Image (cartoon, rainbow, N blue to C red):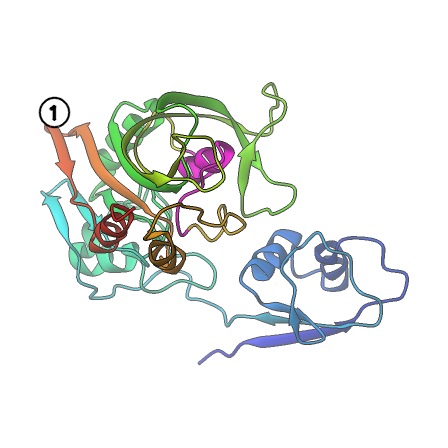
Amino acid sequence: MFESETRAAIAPPDASERVDAWLAKLWPDLSRARIQGLIGQGKLSADGAPVTHAKDKPRAGARYELTLPPPEPAAPAPEAIPLTIAFEDEHLIVVDKAAGMAVHPAPGSMRGTLVNALLAHCGDSLSGIGGVARPGIVHRIDKETTGLVVAAKHDAAHHGLAKLFAKHDLERVYYAVTRGAPKERAARIENVLVRSNEDRRKYVVARNAETNAGKTAITDYWTVESFGQQAGASAGRAAATLLECRLHTGRTHQIRAHMAHLGCPLIGDPLYGKQRAFRAEGAHAAEVAVVVEAFPRQALHAGVLGFVHPITGAARRFESAMPADMEALLAALRGL
């Protein structure tokens, strides 16, 4: 069995560069990207306190400790994990993914993923075009997002699905519950998303729309239901909103980043909404706030997935019911 490794270093008194750059020079076998990822996983500490930002400068004289997880196997292993299957034939499989399951393996999380489960369920038939770690996978949803994901069982299906996603020639509908509400009840959001300079895990709208650093992201949204009055806001500004979002592109964190940009981050979003408190008026506002603040993940569900079957040519459309935790959240919000 492999064991984790801990490395330590004392910050010099004249350190002027970022902590990730300093450590990458100190330990050249680790790239800055690798160190940034480990910092994001909480693996770096300074005098025992966690370091959360790779851009921070080292504190002179502080003892920095970096924990390296044990090496992972080169390829994911099959795991008999129960799956909720919406559709399956000899060409592809549509899974209704639960919260807490990553779609494919990543450093530090090689087990318990949808890929591990599919390898056990489908056997050797999974397509390998997605790479050794992502067999059959043509798209993904975040680990804590629930809902529909399609995977290919062989190369021809993988090629066909990949073309659909590349052309955005399919239907994808998500349901999101936000803190507050967008200014417009329905609109199209079209802009360029780039990585944040403040937190490399996040994506933000580019100040310069002509930049080559990001990618165009397009989301249509409609207000399905509004809840309560937002405390301290102008009349008619909801305390929370259920939105239907239709994706015309598939950028990483697209809906989460777009809603945060509009000033109404998803309830429970630990990355894009943690600085935003829930504000509501009314007799039940305090008890509803407790439910909102306790919601353990971003309130986002991939509820509809529709496409033309890449092999049979049949039009397929799948719907996934709202998960129980989001239903309970909505029930609480209706108390406003």
Above or below residue 225? Residue 30 is below
Magenta segment boundaries in residue numbering = 251-268
Does residue 206 show up? yes
- From the viewer's side, name the closer residue of 28 and 209: 209
Instruction: Tell me the residue at 49%/50% (across/down).
Output: 277
Percent x, y for residue 316? 12, 30
Which residue sits at x=62%, y=23%? Answer: 211
Q: Is residue 139 visible?
A: no
Residue beneath disc 1: 313
Residue 224: % across, % down: 25, 32
Instruction: Please give the name of the residue rendered at 58% of the width and 20% of the height, measured from the top-left corner.
Output: 209
Q: Is residue 313 above or below residue 94?
A: above
Q: Residue 121 or 292: which is nearer the viewer?
A: 292
Helix, strand or loop under label 1: loop
The relative height of residue 171 versus residue 55 in the rendered view (above or below) is above
- Is 48 a magenta residue? no
Looking at the image, which residue sits at the far top?
Answer: 210
Q: Residue at x 57, y 56 (%)?
A: 37
Q: Is residue 327 left or right of residue 269?
A: left
Q: Quadrant of residue 124?
A: bottom left
Image position of 209 (left or right of 179) = right
Q: Residue furthest right?
A: 14
